[in-house]
Amino acid sequence: MTDVTRAITAATSVSASLDLPANDAIVLHNSNKLALRLTPCDVFARVAPVGQEVAQFEVDLAQRLIEVGCPVCPLEPRADPRVYTRDGFTVTLWTYYEPVAPHISPADYAKALERLHVGMLKVDMPSPRFTDRITEAEEVVADPDRSPELTDADRVFPSGRGASWERGSEDRGVVEQLLHGEPHPGNVLSTKSGSLFIDLETCCRGPIEFDLAHVPEAVCEHYPSVDQGLLDECRQLVIAMVAAWRWELGDQFPNGRRFGEELLRLLREGPPWPTLDTVTRRLDGLQKKLKAT
């Protein structure tokens, strides 16, 4: 039995134990965490191996954010709001929303993210700084056992970014607050209730520009009072961080190696720093050309 099959079995078992019938599970996303739509109960389940998640933090934070009116996906109301453990996996159950549009307009996206940031100012929860996440990524790059396919010559490009930012930001008075951490399009749902953010386990403290570095350029154009210089720096940090994750041994991101190679190429070339969706579109375009030849 594969890990994915075991994870699905764990999720359906938890759901059934709560009188939420789950005869089938549709995989919505599978990277380092499995996202499922359980039917016919229509529950959104997130599953991860025990010890490789921060599920309790995510559950607690979601409840706090909902209380202050943030646009985040709520937990499944038919189940106790907690983390369930089954067969070596943690399972959290969330409200499932049928998508109402294939894409969210940049203006609506920016408005929802601004609402999230405003609400997050009202929530006081211990959380890591965004530089801690960058340091974790740099540790992957520094350890050949964790990134065995990365050449020694390329290890220099994703490393040292966090410390460099810290040195350069000491005298700039950068304002930090609670952030989503990865508010990219894959973590935004288009629903009848508006745009809702999911995947809160990456929440951290930092400048709002770090969040904006994960979103399309058009979204940033609709977000008020952006420090463009700081945004450009944060885009560089994000490219280096994501590059490290894509080279980590066992990374399950779809087409992750191609993505990692492209991010390394960008780091070698230097600025201007593109948005992540620009990189994705470029790789998708190249893939289509290859298939057509």
Image (tube, rainbow, N blue to C red):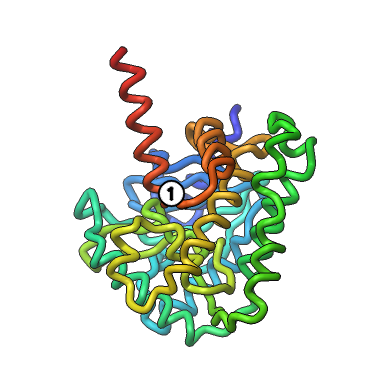
Q: Mark 1 = which residue? A: 276
Q: Residue furthest top?
A: 293
Q: Is residue 207 left or right of residue 139?
A: left
Q: Is residue 19 left or right of residue 260?
A: left
Q: Number of labelled discs?
A: 1
Q: Is residue 107 above or below residue 92?
A: below
Splitting the image into 4 quarters, where does residue 143 fall? top right
Q: Residue furthest bottom?
A: 122
Whether residue 277 is visible? yes
Q: Is residue 119 above or below residue 212?
A: below
Residue 102, x across and y down, in percent: 23, 48
Give the residue displayed 20% in from the left and 53% down from the top. Answer: 101
Q: Amino acid at mark 1?
A: Leu
Splitting the image into 4 quarters, where does residue 109 fall? bottom left
Q: Is residue 261 left or right of residue 156?
A: left
Give the residue displayed 34% in from the left and 51% down from the top. Answer: 41
Give the residue displayed 39% in from the left and 58% down from the top. Answer: 215
| Nearest the eye: 93 or 159 | 159
> Where is the C terminus found, in terms of image quarters?
top left
Are there few (<14), some (14-19), or many (20+) residues within 10 Å of tag 1?
many
- In what element is the residue under mark 1? helix
Residue 227, x across and y down, in percent: 44, 73
> Where is the N terminus found, in terms of image quarters?
top right
Give the residue displayed 47% in from the left and 52% down from the top. Answer: 273
Q: Is residue 292 above or below residue 194?
A: above
Residue 285, x across and y down, in percent: 33, 31
Whether residue 38 is visible? no
Residue 56, x across and y down, in percent: 61, 66
